[in-house]
Image: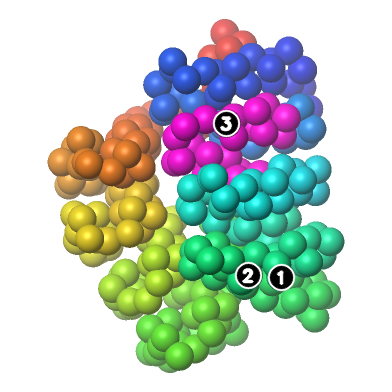
């Protein structure tokens, strides 16, 4: 996107940072900035961390990690260290530090791998495992091979047997990193059997683990996962981080059933769940439309 000038980036940044605009417009602006990249886009994303929407801030951190630009590291460290930020925002900052793949962040991740918030501690432990794996494999190219164009928090395991992968995935005595590796292998295999194995993960383990399962099911966009995602979304005792990710996964799958389910939770008592349903319904509309791309704010501001 080298043809994008600074004035356009600032205009898109104003959309992102305008609390009076609909959240769905601000999300689209964020993903437009992610796709543009570079220091000015990072700066506009940084400006938004004072927002009062935990959902939006966690997505800011996610996008900074996916951009894989080391210039975002100070912003992510600041966010990880800020105990006034919601756990899901701090967790996403920790994961993003791993995604960038810069070994200079190891001391910070080590410090926060002992954080009092379980989701934050587990995320930093995972990010450390990822960086150690990258170091010992001396090859970050393996991480770039995700068929879903995402920088994942763990590389897929070198196993193709779904039954064995499912055993690893659901075994809470196995390290979280190895369970994540099994998760991404099951995603990449993408058979009904592997998707149902993943769906069982929604009932097992920590909030962090279950939220990643939901994220992966959203990437797969397969209708077979809908009842499992709905069950977790409607469980008001489930961690809101998990429920939010289930809502967004339903938005990606975007069947008529998904529309109906999401509309039921648009007034949920948890803000992050309500907002996730708004974003997910926008994703549903996008998936069922002839729109060329989701991150479309550049075209709108240039028009």
Q: Earlier in the sequence, mark 1 or mark 3?
A: 3
Task: State whether residue 30 appears in this view.
Answer: yes
Task: State yes or no: discs 2 and 1 in contact (Cβ < 8 Å).
Answer: yes
Task: State yes or no: discs 1 and 3 in contact (Cβ < 8 Å).
Answer: no
Residue 40 vertical position relative to residue 57 in the rendered view, above or below: above
Question: Which SS does the magenta portion mostly show?
Answer: helix
Task: State whether residue 280 appears in this view.
Answer: no
Instruction: Tell me, for residue 56, which label it has, or none.
Output: none
Where is residue 161 shown, x and y percent of the image? 45, 88
Which picture quadrant has residue 134?
bottom right
Q: Which portion, as a residue range, is magenta? A: 41-65
Residue tagged 2:
113
Where is residue 9 shown, x and y percent of the image? 69, 20
Residue 188 vertical position relative to residue 52 in the rendered view, above or below: below
Residue shown at the point (63%, 70%) measured from the top left: 113
Q: Residue furthest top?
A: 303
Residue tagged 3:
50
Is 100 covered by the magenta stretch? no
Is 64 covered by the magenta stretch? yes
Where is residue 222 shown, x and y percent of the image? 32, 58
Where is residue 155 shown, x and y percent of the image? 62, 72
Residue 160 vertical position relative to residue 116 in the rendered view, above or below: below
Residue shown at the point (59%, 84%) measured from the top left: 158
Badge 2 element: loop
Residue tagged 1:
110
């Amino acid at each position: 996107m080298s043809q994008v000038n600074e004035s356009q980036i600032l205009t898109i940044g104003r959309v992102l940072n305008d609390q009076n605009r609909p959240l769905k417009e601000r999300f689209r602006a964020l993903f437009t900035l992610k796709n543009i990249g570079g220091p000015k886009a990072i700066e506009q994303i940084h400006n938004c961390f004072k927002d009062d929407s935990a959902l939006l801030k966690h997505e800011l951190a996610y996008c900074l990690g996916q951009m894989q630009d080391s210039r975002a590291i100070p912003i992510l460290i600041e966010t990880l260290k800020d105990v006034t930020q919601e756990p899901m925002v701090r967790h996403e900052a920790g994961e993003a530090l791993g995604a960038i793949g810069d070994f200079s962040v190891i001391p910070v991740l080590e410090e926060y791998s002992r954080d009092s918030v379980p989701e934050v501690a587990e995320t930093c432990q995972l990010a450390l495992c990822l960086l150690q794996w990258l170091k010992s494999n001396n090859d970050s190219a393996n991480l770039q091979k995700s068929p879903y164009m995402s920088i994942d928090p763990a590389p897929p395991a070198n196993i193709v047997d779904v039954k064995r992968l499912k055993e690893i995935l659901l075994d809470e005595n196995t390290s979280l990193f190895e369970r994540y590796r099994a998760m991404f292998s099951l995603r990449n295999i993408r058979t009904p059997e592997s998707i149902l194995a993943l769906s069982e993960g929604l009932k097992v383990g920590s909030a962090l683990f279950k939220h990643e399962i939901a994220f992966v099911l959203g990437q797969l966009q397969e209708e077979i996962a809908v009842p499992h995602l709905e069950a977790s979304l409607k469980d008001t005792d489930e961690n809101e981080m998990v429920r939010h990710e289930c809502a967004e996964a339903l938005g990606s799958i975007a069947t008529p059933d998904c529309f109906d389910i999401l509309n039921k939770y648009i007034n949920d008592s948890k803000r992050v769940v309500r907002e996730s349903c708004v974003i997910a319904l926008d994703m549903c509309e996008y998936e069922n439309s002839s729109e060329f791309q989701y991150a479309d704010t550049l075209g709108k501001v240039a028009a």
